[in-house]
Structure formats: structure tokens, C-alpha cells
Amino acid sequence: MSDLSGKIALVTGSVQGIGFAIAKAFAEQGAKVGLHGLAEAGQIEQASKELRAAGAAEVRFFGADLRDVAAIDEMMDDVEQWGGADVLVNNAGIQKTAGLGEVEPALWDAILSVNLSSAFHTMRRAMPIMAQKGYGRVINIASVHGLVASVNKAPYVSAKFGLVGLSKVSALEYANKGDRTAGGITVNCICPGWTETAIIEPQVADRAAQFGGDRDAGIADLLKEKQPSQRLSDPSEIGALATWLCSPVAHNITGTSIPVDGGWTAQ
Ligand code: NAD
């Protein structure tokens, strides 16, 4: 695995869910972790404590609302002062299902800004500094919905396809920076299928309601529809993959979108 001691890793939306699991995996490799998200003081304190206990060399919290470009810029100023992100994970995301005719413009704007535009705003600032260092990793948490569509997810699918495109362009632009020993600069997407976090709860609840409120039956039905393994992913599995992508040995893996989807996109 990767030794991240001395490295600064900013993980957006890391106070919970997949982001927290990635931050924890990085902490276990001794990284200095930039913890980020919208959360109450208690949740921030708890997450920071767990990251320190896992081995983080340092934990700094950033509370930028990713719908606010000026707030993202301020966060990136602070990260630059800290030393610049060696690893940047654009993980924060929001999701709401609705048919195209029911999607209000404000919902479209919110999903596009958090799930797509914020990655542009962080990468624009972080990547030139990575190039100077000769090492950098950008890991964008897209989705199977960056690769295939589903009904009632127009803003989300549009944002995630956009994130895959942004990652490919930036991967090309930075492909020849750095060298094999340092690890170079890579940009990749991880594309999860159903993963056990808060973001899927409204969809689980809707499906469970069709089975008289039986949550397990609801989850089984969701999995049966799209995810051939019939198993949810655990967020720690995404953390393990992200950590591996950070190692210098992954210097030639760039511009890819790696599904963690139990076969969903193989169909
Ligand atoms: P989650 O709801 O548990 O976490 C989302 C995180 O984003 C939170 O930490 C939250 O604070 C942060 N966030 C939301 N809006 C924000 C804003 N305006 N400003 C700053 N931070 C904000 O969900 P999760 O499942 O851990 O999602 C992480 C990523 O994984 C998302 O991009 C999501 O689209 C993607 N994903 C999840 C699944 C799944 O099944 N869980 C599947 C595919 C992709």
C-alpha cells in the first residue's frame, strides 16, 4: 500500500460516508488530512478524533460550502498556505431523484455545483502546485451514473458524466509531469454502485415502503435491479482503492474511471 506520511490529503465531504472512509484510510497511512464537509461541531470533533486515532499526522477542518465559489477559493488559499494538497479527493455530493419535468432549476444548479463545478474549482487551484512537486493524485468520486444512466436522475447523471470528462481532460494535461520515482500526477474517477451511506437512505426508504417498511427487503430489491453481486459496498472498500491509487506504483493509471459496482456496468 501507499505510505502517505508527509503528504497533505484534502478530502471533500469527509465528515461522513465514503469521504470519511477515504480520510480514515489515508490517516492509517500517516497522511495530514484535510477534513471537510457541512456538519455540526460534535460530528467534526468526533471525525477528527477518529482520524487522529487512526494515525493521521495532522487533521485540519474546512467548512466551505461547495455551492459558494468564493468559499472554495478561501479553502484552497488555506490549503496552499498549509503546503498544498498532494492528494485531492473530490468526494462531496448530493442526490435527489425526480423526473425531468419535476426538477426545479434550483435543484439542477445545486447538484451541478456540488457534484461537478466544485471539482473544477479545487483542481484548478491544486493541480499546478502538484505539477511543481512532481507528485499529485486527484481522485474524483463519480458513480456508476458517470458511466450509465438511470431514470429520475438527470442532474446527478449529468454532473457525474461531466466529472468523468473533467477528469480525463485534466489527466491528459498533467500526464507528463513528474516521474516514475516521485509518482507523477494522476487523475482518476472511482465509480461506486450502491454503497452503504446516508445518501442512499431516501431511495432505500422508498423501496422499503413497497415491502411494508422492510428495509432489508427494500435493499435486496434495489440490488436485484442493477447490482449483480447483490451486495452493497462498504465505504472502507472505496478507501482502500483510493489509498492504492495514491502509491507511486500507480503512476501510469490516469484518466480512468474505475467501477466498484458488483458488475452493474458490465451488463
Ligand atoms: P453522504 O451523504 O454520506 O456524504 C456526502 C458528503 O458531502 C457529506 O460529508 C456532506 O457534508 C458533503 N456535502 C454535501 N453538500 C455539500 C456542500 N454544499 N458543501 C460542502 N459539502 C457538502 O454520501 P456518500 O455516499 O458518502 O457520498 C459520497 C460521494 O459518493 C458522492 O459524490 C456520491 O455521489 C458518491 N456516490 C455514492 C454512492 C452510494 O451508493 N453511497 C454511489 C455512487 C456514488
Image (cartoon, rainbow, N blue to C red):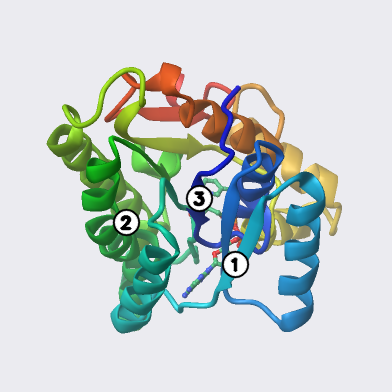
Q: Would residue 107 be seen by someone viewing this image from the given angle? A: no
- Tag in front: 3 or 2: 3
Which mark, by number, is residue 135? none
Residue 35 or residue 227, whichever sits in front? 35
Residue type (three-letter) at the residue carrying disc 1:
Arg
The answer to whether the residue labelled 2 contacts the one labelled 1, judged by CB atoms less than 8 Å apart, is no
Say which element carries label 2: helix
Residue 162 lies, in percent from the top left, at 25, 50
Picture quarter with the N terminus = top right
Q: Considering only order in the chain, which callout, 2 or 3, is on the residue closer to the N terminus?
A: 3
Q: Is residue 57 above or below residue 199?
A: above
Which mark, by number, is residue 9? 3
In which quarter of the view is residue 170 placed? top left
Image point (65%, 64%), residue name: 15
Mark 3 vs ligand 1: CB under 8 Å?
no
Residue 254 or residue 233, whichever sits in front? 254
Residue 86 lies, in percent from the top left, at 41, 46
Q: Considering only order in the chain, which callout, 1 or 3, is on the residue closer to the N terminus?
A: 3
Which mark, by number, is residue 159? 2
Residue assigned mark 1 = 60
Picture quarter with the C terminus = top left
Q: How many marks?
A: 3
